[in-house]
Image (spheres, helix red, strand yellow):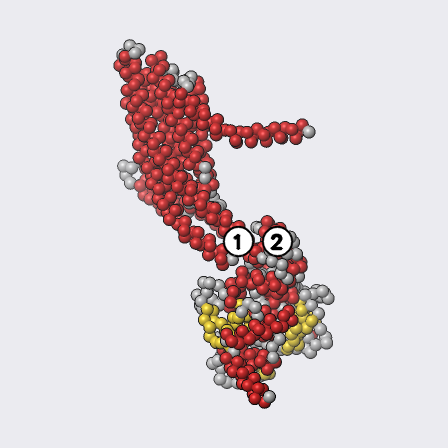
Amino acid sequence: MDLVLKSFQSQSLISFVRTFSIPIGIMILVAMMVIPLSPWMLDILFTTNILVSLLVLMVALQTFKPLDFSSFPTVLLFATVLRLGLNVASTRVILGSGHNGTDSAGSIIEAFGAFVMSGSYAVGLFVFTILVIINLIVITKGAGRVSEVAARFTLDAMPGKQMAIDADLNAGVISSEDAKERRAEIAKEGEFYGAMDGAAKFVKGDAIAGILILVINIIGGLVIGTTQHDLSLSDSAESYILLTVGDGLVAQIPSLLLAMATATIVTRISSDKDDLAGQISSQMGLSKAWVPVSAVLLLFGLVPGMPNTLFIAGSIFSGIIAWFTSKNREINLKDKELKNEEQDDSDAIGKIDIDDVSDNASISLDLGYGLISMVDSNDKKSAGPLISKITGIRKQVSKDLGFIIPNVRVKDDLSLDSNSYRIRVGHTIVAQDKVYVDRKLAMPSDETQLKIQGIQVEDPTFGLESFWIEQHLVSKAEANHYMIIEPEAVIATHLNNVLLRYSGDLISQDDVQSLLDNLSKSNPQLVQSVVPKLVPLHHLTIILRNLLTERVPINDLKKILEALTNLSEKKLSPEELSEAVRPAISSLLIQKISNINESLNVVTFNPEFEQMLIAMSKKSGSEGILIDPELAKQMINSLIEVGEKFTMDGQPLVIVTSPIIRKDIAILLRQHIEDLVVLSFTELPENKKVKVVSTIGEKINNNSQKEKSNENTTV
């Protein structure tokens, strides 16, 4: 109970200090200008002034970006008022008690004056003048100019930044909350630089006030000392000039520190990793820069008549720095290489073994006994050629799709022909073919004219006419522009095609949970707010499966969850949510099938034909589109004919249609055309050029109209 009471009291005290410290401080500043202060109170306040100025400068040096110290303009105002209040208070003490001696205004003013002047009035005045010139002409004027330009550029750039935020928001790149935060940051940035433009005038005015106060104190002190206190001119000068210069120095040093803090803030380049010291050390710690510096200093050190020892010492010092920076750079590079090597080693050999057989395997590759040699390896430390290929395929497909493809269980199957292999997804056989270990597959190209002798087959992946040829015919085939493929590469390529086609069946709830756990490291609030509050885990798994079934990558899970957040108010099924989030991530699919600088070649439906399909879809309801078999056959044949042209150009067939029928059309056509992408109009990005190369439906409409007219005539 006592601990709770003490904690409550401490929290109340902190809250009280935060609430009333600034009003109380302002009242003290006003009182300083009116109420006479004793010398010992001046010493305390001058020390506090120097402390505050040093603190402000250190905070300015440690910030990562200017907005981290957004209260700086207000702090600068209060610090300036504090210093001016001290000037008023010290002037009252100097002019009122200066005739009593140099210690009448406190020990700090006396110490600064005596130390700088060194027994000479001229030295003190000149030193003070130089400090004022440095502060006013160099630092303050430069900081004021930088503040003015920064404020102008920041305000001019605000409309463009606002438009960029709106564009990202409309494109679905950021959420509405992110947009609000970025708009608030831009507004805060504009207010900060605008305030800094005005705050720089405080520093300039403070420096000018210091000069005027110095002149007033000297003239007033000499007049008061000679007329009111019957001092000689030399005695008055000895007391009043020392006190005035000491007072001016005590005020100018904090003013100089705050001017440096102002210049530091307005000249900072924002960084999310390094403070000012880190930026300077990382950018100036280049051995290539220090080596020529060392060489030039050494050259000066060898010139007769020069201070050779100093220049040679400077050359040696620069050479040591160059050596240390070079070694540090080498160590950093080695560390990066070691990390990369460790990562590569961990992924080099997949944990796949022929004896590692499980009935629960997501993917299985069954081999005839004649293909076992592709799995075995003479080197016990490395995997066989087929295993290495499969590991590489898994790694690449995982990167492309955005989740880890399960291990492929490789095992022998005596029920298969010796040269046959079979691919299973779960317990379902999805592909089967033959390869010949002692032969190579020769695939003809467009330039091939001679038919080579071998076992004629169709390539299992692309369905192209190919030949399994013997080893001694490889050179002849290559000379006739055949592409030669190793047997293990044929199986691996076929497996790659299967993994892409059945990726939706390979992702499980455990995989989705692993993706969420990884995303929660960087976006914990997003994951917690979506799963399972808005979307249960099993529904999210269905959504991701639907996307993968149509080869839409799920790499950007963050954007998918943000899109689901925006759809939380709508009560949609997982299938409807799958369609609704596609526009947010369709760019991931489009960038895989079309280069960023090239236009996207697409096929569309004739408007009348598309309206007919939409009408059929509405009549069919939730059962999917019910289309006349003959009409469907004509549409598919037309698309196959167009798709052959795309295949010749090395591009997948891309169809763009209405969002209403996109899913039904994709299901219908995917049964007949494998390499097919069906997009809706809403999935086309605004910054991507789209070129319609063909329109489907005109001939189909004409044929259907003729059939209807014939039927009417018969009736």
Q: How busy is the neighbourhood of tag 1: few (under 14 within 10 Å), some, or many (20 plus)?
A: some
Q: Residue furthest front?
A: 715
151 in relation to 127, above or below:
below
Question: With 39 as the anchor, is 239 left or right in this view?
Answer: left
Q: Residue at x 60, y 71 (%)?
A: 618
> Could you tell me if the residues under marks 1 and 2 are in contact, i.e. CB atoms within 8 Å?
no
Q: Residue at x 41, y 18 (%)?
A: 36
In-front residue for pair 608/641: 608
Question: With 28 as the anchor, is 535 left or right in this view?
Answer: right
Q: Position of residue 338 (x, y in %)?
A: 54, 53
Q: Position of residue 332 (x, y in %)?
A: 50, 49
Q: Residue at x 46, y 65 (%)?
A: 688
501 in relation to 340, above or below:
below
Question: With 415 as the anchor, is 318 left or right in this view?
Answer: left
Residue type at mark 1: give it: Ser
Residue type at mark 2: give it: Val
The answer to whether any part of residue 74 appears in the image is yes
In-front residue for pair 680/296: 680
Q: CA distance from mark 1 to mark 2?
A: 14 Å
375 in relation to 254, above or below:
below
Q: Quadrant of the C terminus?
A: bottom right
The mark found on residue 175 in the picture is 1
- Quarter of the image where one finds residue 460: bottom right
In terms of sequence position, does the residue under pointer 1 or pointer 2 come before the other? Answer: 1
Q: Which residue is tagged 2?
A: 530
- Quarter of the image where one finds residue 514: bottom right
Q: Position of residue 549 (x, y in %)?
A: 61, 67
Q: Please, what secondary structure does the residue beneath circle 1 have? A: loop
